[in-house]
């Protein structure tokens, strides 16, 4: 059946091509996100992949499966994109008359973005190869994806293909048009580089999605945020809570700095509203502020990372992420 579809697709049958490639689109999208750290960049890379696959189907030699061939194209499209996206300058603080506290450090992944859980559903249930070293839920977490963005491009690709997806080494070599020894060398370096950041990635397990523990934390967070109660928010944080706000590279660690950071975002004289959603397997919220006419205007998208019964990380993203989560930029008065 696959051979027949390939023959028809090569002859210009678009429906046959879609039948061949559609089962892999969503996992390829997640793959592109892991490599690029941005859902929009992943979308662009996926579209480029499908165009290249359609145009290059005549050269498909059937030495590998359609899935592996598509990963080869997607990975190389992403590698080209990585080199371009990493040259983007970080955005400077641009809120007049508001001065942020000195950051704990300047981040190296300013253009990181969230990934909607609605695009993950079903993808992480797909079987991976026997060489995979990471749980699929962990491999889509914001901390893990941020850590990946620090790796050199080739190391990034090798580690994802081998340790996240479990590809055999010869498949990785085929994907990157490389030798097995060179892939092994890149993998060793990638693992060492990633290991330096494991303390930030591996924490106590998050509570189960929809569990009473998660529901309780979310309810307390929403109540505290909507009432601009900074003390109540800080009470929810771990001692080493990590806060960031891509694409500005300012990163803060610890409750004290988190409290100072939150004073920039919340004004006790204003009213706020949160719209719940989910990103990277964790709770997320579209944040709105009430305007004088009673409407609610978007101010940012927050993701929180839970560990045990506390929040260990909070990231603020810009309103440009709202459409991916089905969130409007304004809401009517309630």
Image (spheres, rainbow, N blue to C red):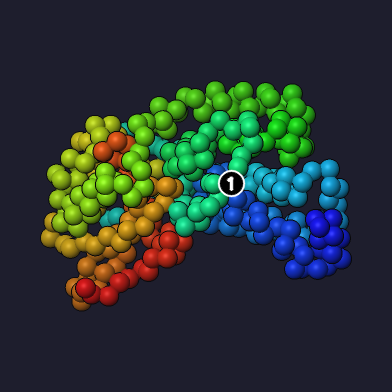
Q: Residue at x 73, y 40 (%)?
A: 175
The one of 176 and 4 positioned closer to us in this rendering: 4
Q: 315 left or right of 158? A: left
Task: Name the secondary structure under disc 1.
Answer: loop
Can I make out residue 66 in this image?
yes
Q: Position of residue 30 (x, y in %)?
A: 56, 49
Q: 63 left or right of 208? A: right
Quarter assignment of residue 249: top left
Q: Position of residue 136 (x, y in %)?
A: 52, 40
> The C terminus is located in which quarter?
bottom left
> The N terminus is located in which quarter?
bottom right
Residue topped by disc 1: 126
Dot 1 surroundings within 10 Å: few (below 14), some, or many (20 or more)? few
Q: Position of residue 6 (x, y in %)?
A: 82, 58
Q: Residue at x 66, y 56 (%)?
A: 23
Relative to residue 95, is residue 304 depicted above or below? above
Can I make out residue 51 in this image?
no
């Amino acid at each position: 059946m696959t051979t027949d579809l390939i023959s028809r697709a090569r002859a210009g049958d678009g429906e046959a091509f879609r039948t061949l490639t559609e089962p892999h689109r969503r996992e390829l999208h997640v793959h592109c996100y892991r490599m690029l750290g941005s859902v929009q960049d992943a979308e662009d890379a996926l579209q480029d992949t499908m165009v290249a696959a359609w145009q290059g189907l005549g050269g498909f030699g059937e030495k590998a499966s359609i899935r592996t061939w598509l990963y080869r194209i997607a990975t190389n499209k992403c590698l080209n994109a990585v080199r371009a996206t990493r040259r983007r300058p970080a955005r400077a603080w641009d809120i007049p008359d508001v001065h942020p506290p000195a950051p704990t450090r300047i981040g190296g992944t300013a253009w990181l973005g969230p990934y909607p859980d609605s695009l993950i559903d079903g993808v992480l249930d797909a079987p991976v190869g026997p060489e995979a070293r990471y749980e699929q839920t962990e491999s889509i977490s914001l901390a893990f994806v941020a850590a990946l963005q620090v790796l050199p491009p080739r190391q990034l690709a090798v580690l994802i293909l081998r340790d996240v997806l479990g590809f055999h080494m010869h498949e990785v070599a085929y994907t990157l048009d490389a030798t097995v020894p060179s892939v092994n060398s890149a993998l060793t370096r990638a693992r060492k580089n990633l290991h330096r950041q494991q303390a930030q990635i591996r924490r106590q397990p998050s509570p189960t999605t929809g569990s009473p523990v998660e529901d309780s934390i979310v309810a307390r967070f929403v109540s505290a945020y909507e009432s601009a109660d900074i003390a109540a928010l800080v009470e929810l944080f771990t001692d080493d809570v990590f806060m960031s706000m891509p694409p500005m590279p300012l990163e803060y660690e610890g409750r004290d700095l988190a409290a100072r950071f939150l004073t920039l975002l919340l004004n006790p004289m204003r009213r706020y509203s949160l719209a719940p959603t989910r990103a990277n397997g964790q709770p997320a919220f579209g944040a709105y502020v009430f305007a004088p006419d009673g409407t609610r205007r978007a101010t940012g998208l927050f993701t929180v990372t839970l560990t045990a019964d506390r929040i260990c990380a909070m990231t603020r993203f810009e309103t440009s992420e709202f459409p991916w989560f089905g969130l409007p930029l304004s809401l009517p008065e309630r």
